[in-house]
Image (cartoon, rainbow, N blue to C red):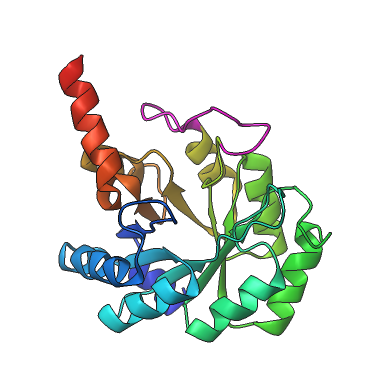
Amino acid sequence: MHPVLKQLEKGLIVSCQALEGEPLHSSFIMGRMALAAKQGGAVGIRANSVPDILEIKKQVDLPVIGIIKQVYEDHPVFITPTMNEIDALAETGVEIIATDATNRTRPDGCDLESFYKKVRSKYPNLLLMADVSSVEEAIMADELGFDIVAPTLYGYTEETNGLKIDDHNYAVIKQIVKEVKNAKVLAEGNVSTPEIARSVLDINVHAVVVGGAITRPQLITKRFVEAMQK
């Protein structure tokens, strides 16, 4: 097993992201958020944008899953959508690059297979993570050769719009774990409590990614307020 994948095994990866317009949008703050995550026991960080990643790497020595959210006009594929973003991420020294691995055409007209081959050819030693929205896409990503797959985009594509990973049976994750032969499967999406994070490990996922439940205080506050108003 790759040493980075070994380091992540059965651990918590914290997604430290704040987009423009969110209260914590700041590379400095994301660096401190990553440091807090490490002090709490996180084994890895998922981060968006070159400035955030560079700051995070100054603060912690954990493996980083890097993405760049870049919208091209109104194109629906925006998580590391083209080679421009891959090149920028590779320069930061991230250990893993994640990209939209749905079956949708990319902004530059590439399909996933062509894009994957370009990336793998240029960066043969980088670990690549597939953000998918379905079991079928996870199987395809695995067959292409992605090192990691996760249902990050389940509920965020036209076909899955409004759906959520069910926190009682995790059918989507269970099926992905069953069908994927080589890639490591991460649980990502709707992991909103420590109890859920612990329970998904029993599905035999490689590691668990948690974002908003840890790093978006406005969402955490909203959950408390809504619960108190019931």
Residue 55 drawn at (x, y percent): 35, 78
* Residue at x 42%, y 48% (from the top left corner): 187
* Residue at x 71%, y 83% (from the top left corner): 122
Most extreme residue toward the top, as rendered? Answer: 230
Quadrant of the image containing the C terminus: top left
Q: How many labels does the image show?
A: 0
Most extreme residue toward the front, as rendered? Answer: 21
Tell me if residue 82 is in the magenta stretch: no
Residue 216 drawn at (x, y percent): 30, 48
Q: Main secondary structure of the magenta part?
A: loop
Residue 2 visible, this angle: yes
Q: Nearer the viewer, residue 90 or 69?
A: 69
Instruction: Examine the rendered structure and indicate whether residue 176 appears above or below residue 5.
Output: above
Q: Which of 116 and 32 is in front in this view?
A: 32
In the rendered image, which quarter is residue 144 located in?
bottom right
* Residue at x 59%, y 50% (from the top left corner): 180
Magenta-colored span: 156-171
Instruction: Examine the rendered structure and indicate whether residue 162 appears above or below residue 89.
Output: above
Residue 121 drawn at (x, y percent): 73, 80
Tell me if residue 169 is in the magenta stretch: yes
